[in-house]
Image: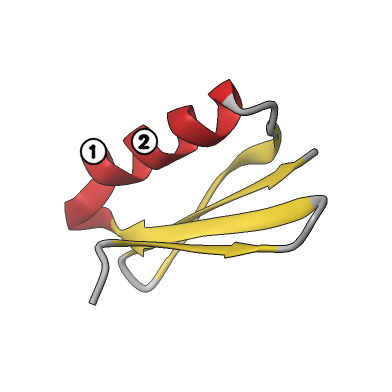
């Protein structure tokens, strides 16, 4: 199972990972930002998981 999960459509995506995988989570978000994706709000957390939404 991947450490970071990216659910993506053409213009919107949600990145999620367990808080133990925060470094990988940040790395994937940075990769998406370098490809033109923009953050939508801040990081959300629930049940030891981190979530970040992005749009294009």
Classed neighbour count for the residue bearing mark 1: other residues with Cα under 10 Å, few (<14), some (14–19), many (≥20):
few
Quadrant assignment for the N terminus = bottom left
Say which of 20 and 6 sits in front: 6
Residue 37 image offset from top left, x and y in percent: 69, 33
49 with respect to 41 (left or right): left
Determine which quarter of the picture holds residue 40.
top right
Say which of 5 and 10 sits in front: 10
The residue sitting at the bottom extreme is 1
Say which of 40 and 48 sits in front: 40
Separation of disc 1 and disc 2 at Cα? 5 Å
Q: How is the image coloured?
A: secondary structure
Q: Which mark is residue 26?
A: 2
Q: Give the answer, above or below, for where 7 lies relative to 23.
A: below
The answer to whether marks 1 and 2 mark residues whose Cβ atoms lie closer than 8 Å is yes
33 with respect to 56 (left or right): left
Residue 21 image offset from top left, x and y in percent: 21, 52
> What residue is disc 1 on?
23
11 with respect to 14 (left or right): right
Q: Residue at x 70, y 38 (%)?
A: 41
Say which of 49 and 11 sits in front: 11
Residue 17 image offset from top left, x and y in percent: 35, 60
Q: Give the answer, above or below, for where 35 lies relative to 8.
A: above
Residue 34 image offset from top left, x and y in percent: 55, 22
45 with respect to 1 (left or right): right
Q: Residue at x 76, y 53 (%)?
A: 12
Quadrant assignment for the C terminus = top right
Of helix, strand and loop, which one carries label 2? Answer: helix
Classed neighbour count for the residue bearing mark 2: other residues with Cα under 10 Å, few (<14), some (14–19), many (≥20):
some
Determine which quarter of the picture holds residue 23.
top left
């Amino acid at each position: 199972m991947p450490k970071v999960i990216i659910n993506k459509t053409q213009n919107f995506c949600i990145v999620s990972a367990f808080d133990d995988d925060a470094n990988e989570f940040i790395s994937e978000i940075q990769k998406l930002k370098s490809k033109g994706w923009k953050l939508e709000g801040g990081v959300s957390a629930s049940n030891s998981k981190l979530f970040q939404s992005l749009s294009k």
